[in-house]
Image (tube, grey):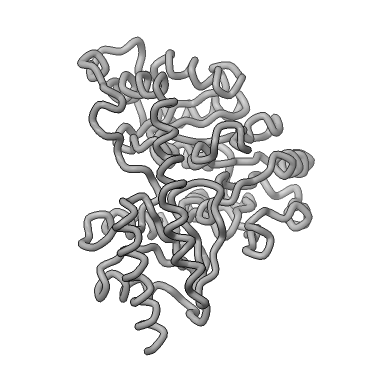
Amino acid sequence: MEFEPFQYMRFAKRLEYADGIFMAGSGMNKPKPGVLDFKPADLSIESLCSNYGDPRNVAWLAEKYATTGEHVVMTAGSSEANFLVFASQLSAGDKVIIETPGYPQFFSLASLVGAEVLPLPRRFEDGFQPDVSELRKLLDDGVRMVVLTNLHNPSMARMPREIMVEIAEAAAKVGALVLVDEVYVDHLKPGDGDESAFSAGDNVVVTSSLTKVYGLSGLRFGWAVGPKSLASTMLDLIDVVDPELPTVTQNMAHYALENLARLRPIARRLHEQNWPVVKEWADAREDVEYFHPPGGITVWLRVKGVAETGNLATVARQDYGVLVVPGEYFQSPGWLRVGYKIEPTAVREGLARLGKAIDDFKSH
């Protein structure tokens, strides 16, 4: 079977264990001991039901999205949720509109099912907002799905509610589904544009997890919320690959969901603490332009005069000991995604090293 490998994931997995100042991550670190204070009962392998997820978790998510459990599908992280949506909705020869720059998993999934990708640009000069007029030009009867992220990965741009609704309405006219990966949206302040796209239209499915904002990647706890017919097909696929979800994960996730209010402010404080450090560094460099993120722990920046950043990232890692993500993984040569979830002093040191790497690279 031929498909486009998810090269970024291979890169990210290897980089996480490399030596140097780690500024390549986009997810929060694990909560410190005592923040959630898991009890022995949370580690039990006994569960109410683990076939399709603990019903307490299904009910919690249904309430969060103001819907019913028939619309909720529990998954092993948002990556599996995205896979199940693609596999349920698309067949060989179908067209799928995917934002660019965009998360490379989406392009791998499209190739896996044999779908044709139609890129929808999200441009720096437009604040990385999708252009609905461009979307309408791409939509035809062959388009089965539109794929977006909110917050946008890699820029962390927030998509306004009115654009979500416009996109859902435009896609509905040709019978297309809209998938919005919302794994980063809780980086925003509560009530500050963090509403889910799920309610933007009956043809919208959203995916998320406890990883990027809450630091619980090890639980592999994710979900999709969408139309009942889609959810039913996703469960058919789950029957093939997941006889049951891990019981311990479901128990621990239940406790975590009940205590998310203790975790979300940690992520927000980290953004507010470290973003000024990043901004100060970027503003001081005439050869760097960047998008000001409303939340999150990464910045998307362009290095002027550098046509590709793969080799620059290699120089930064090997010669200066700082780890960043080249824009080539997000269809954007010349850009870098730089994370700042580490301590402020380490952020300053990492950026200083990155600056030296840029100067070195450009001088040669």
Image height of 303 relative to 149, above or below: below
- Relative image position of residue 76 (x, y in whole percent): 38, 33
Residue 299 on image: x %, y %: 48, 58
| Residue lying at 44% horizontally and 66% vertically, measured from the top left | 281
Relative height, residue 253 to residue 179 (above, below): above
Q: Residue at x 44, y 33 (%)?
A: 264
Q: How many marks?
A: 0
Q: Is residue 122 above or below residue 178?
A: below
Name the foreground residue: 48 vs 257. Answer: 257
Could you tell me if residue 360 is visible in this image? yes
**Residue 341, position as x, y percentages in the image:** 36, 50
Depth check, front residue: 123 or 105: 123
- Assign the C terminus to one quadrant of the image: bottom left
Regarding residue 174, the answer to whether it shows in the image is no
Q: Is residue 302 left or right of residue 170?
A: left
Foreground: 196 or 58? 196
Q: Position of residue 54 (x, y in %)?
A: 39, 16
Looking at this view, name the residue that lies furthest to the bottom: 364
Residue in the foreground of this view, choosing between 234 and 318: 318
Q: Look at 30% across and 57% down and name the residue there.
A: 345
Is 236 located above or below residue 335 in the figure? above
Which residue is found at the position 38% from the left and 31% from the top? 221
The N terminus - image quarter: bottom left
